[in-house]
Image: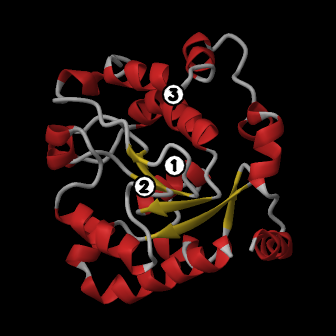
């Protein structure tokens, strides 16, 4: 199975991240910038310290309006990492990502390919705190949260990342204002980790016609995993 996966990734021109990261985690994600004390500190944290730091973070104004930070949920040694945009009202109340109607749809999407949110899967967001009124994240908020997500990815070492929604895709891929339509249907490379872009479940609840496209993206993800 691993041989098939590596052959497929080689064909795509991607490096198998589980080899590189096992040797030197920062060789994949990049060393922290000199002088960036907060980022450097976060990128040295273990899992428990990272959770505690996220819970008490005051790096941007979102801490003033949140109920609680939403760190993420799932298997600490996942094959799959699903990344959304930011917590909504339900997630802010419960402290867990994707727990409202969109979360139920995500659970169904996972089940359709034989996965669940607690086995070989971790679910996180670009932002750890809810923007007021579920508005789009602002640049300073993304900058404040970026080290947390980077360190999560380093510690989780997923074999595949699935990005949910336009904003998360643009953030992870530095894709400017590119649309989902232009980013989906292909395997991207995130520091050696294959990455698939698909629609956010909340979008699919409003646009049922695109559920078939989301299924195509999940099939591509399964194929990429071998």
Question: Does the residue at mark 2 contact the one at mark 3 (Cβ under 8 Å)?
Answer: no
Identify which residue is drawn at 76% across, 42% down. 21
Q: Is residue 67 above or below residue 117?
A: above
Number of the front mark, 3 or 1:
3
Of callouts 3 and 1, which one flags the residue occurring earlier in the amino acid sequence?
A: 3
Mark 3 Cα shell of 10 Å, populated few (<14), some (14-19), many (≥20): some
Identify which residue is drawn at 49% across, 60% down. 163
User: Which residue has dot 3 on it?
Assistant: 47
Dot 1 falls on a residue whose secondary structure is helix
The foreground one among 126 and 52 is: 52
Dot 3 falls on a residue whose secondary structure is helix
66 lies left or right of 220:
left
**Residue 96's spot in the image, x, y percent?**
27, 44
User: Which residue has dot 1 on it?
Assistant: 171
Q: Is residue 103 above or below residue 65?
A: below
Question: Does the residue at mark 1 contact the one at mark 2 (Cβ under 8 Å)?
Answer: yes
Residue 1 falls in which quadrant of the image?
A: bottom right
**Residue 120's spot in the image, x, y percent?**
50, 57
Q: Is residue 195 above or below residue 204?
A: above
What is the number of callouts on the image?
3
Identify which residue is drawn at 54% across, 14% down. 38
**Residue 45's spot in the image, x, y percent?**
57, 20
Mark 1 Cα shell of 10 Å, populated few (<14), some (14-19), many (≥20): some
Q: Is residue 54 above or below residue 217?
A: above
Of callouts 2 and 3, which one flags the residue occurring earlier in the amino acid sequence?
A: 3
Mark 2 Cα shell of 10 Å, populated few (<14), some (14-19), many (≥20): many
Query: In what quadrant of the picture does the C terminus appear?
Result: bottom right
User: Which residue has dot 2 on it?
Assistant: 167
90 lies left or right of 200:
left
The foreground one among 98 and 175 is: 98
């Amino acid at each position: 199975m691993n041989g098939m996966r590596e052959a497929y990734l080689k064909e795509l021109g991607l490096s198998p991240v589980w080899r590189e990261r096992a040797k030197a985690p920062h060789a994949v994600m990049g060393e922290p910038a000199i002088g960036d004390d907060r980022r450097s500190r976060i990128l040295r944290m273990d899992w428990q310290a990272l959770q505690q730091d996220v819970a008490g973070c005051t790096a941007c104004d979102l801490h003033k309006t949140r109920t609680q930070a939403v760190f993420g949920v799932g298997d600490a040694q996942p094959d799959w990492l699903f990344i959304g945009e930011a917590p909504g009202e339900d997630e802010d109340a419960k402290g867990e990502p994707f727990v409202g109607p969109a979360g139920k749809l995500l659970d169904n999407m996972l089940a359709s390919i034989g996965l669940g949110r607690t086995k070989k899967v971790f679910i996180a967001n670009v932002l750890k705190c809810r923007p007021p009124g579920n508005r789009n994240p602002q640049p300073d908020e993304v900058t404040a949260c970026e080290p947390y997500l980077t360190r999560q990815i380093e510690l989780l070492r997923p074999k595949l990342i699935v990005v949910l929604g336009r904003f998360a895709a643009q953030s992870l891929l530095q894709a400017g204002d590119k649309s989902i339509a232009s980013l989906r249907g292909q395997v991207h490379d995130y520091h050696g980790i294959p990455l698939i872009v698909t629609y956010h479940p909340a979008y699919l609840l409003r646009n049922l016609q695109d559920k078939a496209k989301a299924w195509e993206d999940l099939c591509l993800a399964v194929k990429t995993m071998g």
